[in-house]
Amino acid sequence: RDRGGDWSSDVCSSDLGVSTAHRIFKQATNSTPFKITLVSPNTDFYWNMASPRGIIPGQIEDEKLFQPISAGFDQYPAGQFEFVLGYAESLDVDAKRVKVSNNITLDYDLLILGTGTNAKEGMPFKGVGSTEATKDLLHDFQEKVAKAEKIVICGAGVTGVEVAGELGFEYGQKKKIILVRVKRPKALSPANTRSSEVHQQFSKAVQQVYRR
């Protein structure tokens, strides 16, 4: 929206939204003043890439898995960034206006929608609602992992193999870890000597079951 040469951008946040906002700041020129408003239901950025290890109690502290979103933008000029805690509820394309929860209305020139994704069955591999809800789910899952004597991982994609590997490394001699798969995961394909060694170590710690 024209404000005497200024322009504004609203970013409805996910991991993509946060990284995009940082990229705009780092690559934008100083010729045109602008402001970015980041909308997110989470106060903290969840580094879910590390969640396969994070589900194991005592492996990664919350402070490393969760980082305050706003603090990451303190490095940029004051007045050019605003963080709004909430959900984007409706969009008026013609008026270039977004209605956010808590009765907040935002006008924009450019809108970036980063909707993100969710894991099924309440798994803590993605954020779930608020930061506190995600932390609670992760802690509950850690307790289940600690108490379980047998853990079955269904699916040998990248996440499945990584989860099985982390669990096998930590509990291979104490718990029964089973990976259900259709065929050998590409991540463990013995195409060279190194991957063959990894596969042997993996097979010692994780029982693999083929599903037709």
Image (cartoon, rainbow, N blue to C red):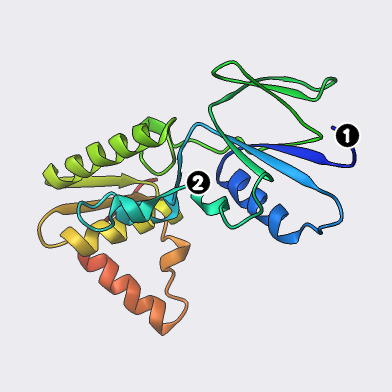
- For mark 2, what is the residue? 69
Question: Seen in the image, is 14 located left or right of residue 1?
Answer: left
Who is closer to the viewer here, 41 or 84? Answer: 84
Residue 120 lies left or right of residue 97; in this view the side is left
Between 186 and 33, the residue placed more toward the observer is 33
Q: Amino acid at mark 2?
A: Ile
Helix, strand or loop at mark 1: loop
User: Which residue does the image show at 44% across and 37% down from the upper left?
Assistant: 119
Please report contact status of discs 1 and 2: CB closer than 8 Å, yes or no: no
Q: CA distance from mark 1 to mark 2?
A: 28 Å
How busy is the neighbourhood of tag 1: few (under 14 within 10 Å), some, or many (20 plus)?
few
Q: Quadrant of residue 59?
A: bottom left
- Where does the image place residue 92, in percent across and percent down from the top left? 77, 19
Q: Position of residue 176 (x, y in %)?
A: 16, 53
- The part of the image, by quadrant, that contains residue 112 is top right
Q: Secondary structure at mark 2?
A: loop
Type of the residue with mark 1 = Asp
**Residue at image x 58%, y 58%?**
75
Q: In the image, what residue occupies the spot 42% across and 52% down? A: 159
The reply, left or right, for residue 63 in relation to residue 12 is: left
What percent of the width, then of the height, locates residue 72? 53, 53
Can residue 8 be seen?
Answer: yes
Give neighbour class at mark 2: few <14, some 14-19, many 20+ (Cα, 10 Å).
Answer: some
Location of residue 39 by image quarter: top right
Q: Is residue 156 in sight in this rendering?
A: no
Q: Which residue is mark 1?
A: 2
Q: Is residue 77 left or right of residue 151?
A: right
Quadrant containing the N terminus in the rendered view: top right
Relative to 75, does residue 111 appear above or below in the rendering?
Answer: above
- Which quarter shows the C terminus? top left
Compared with 8, 209 (above or below) is below
Q: Earlier in the sequence, mark 1 or mark 2?
A: 1
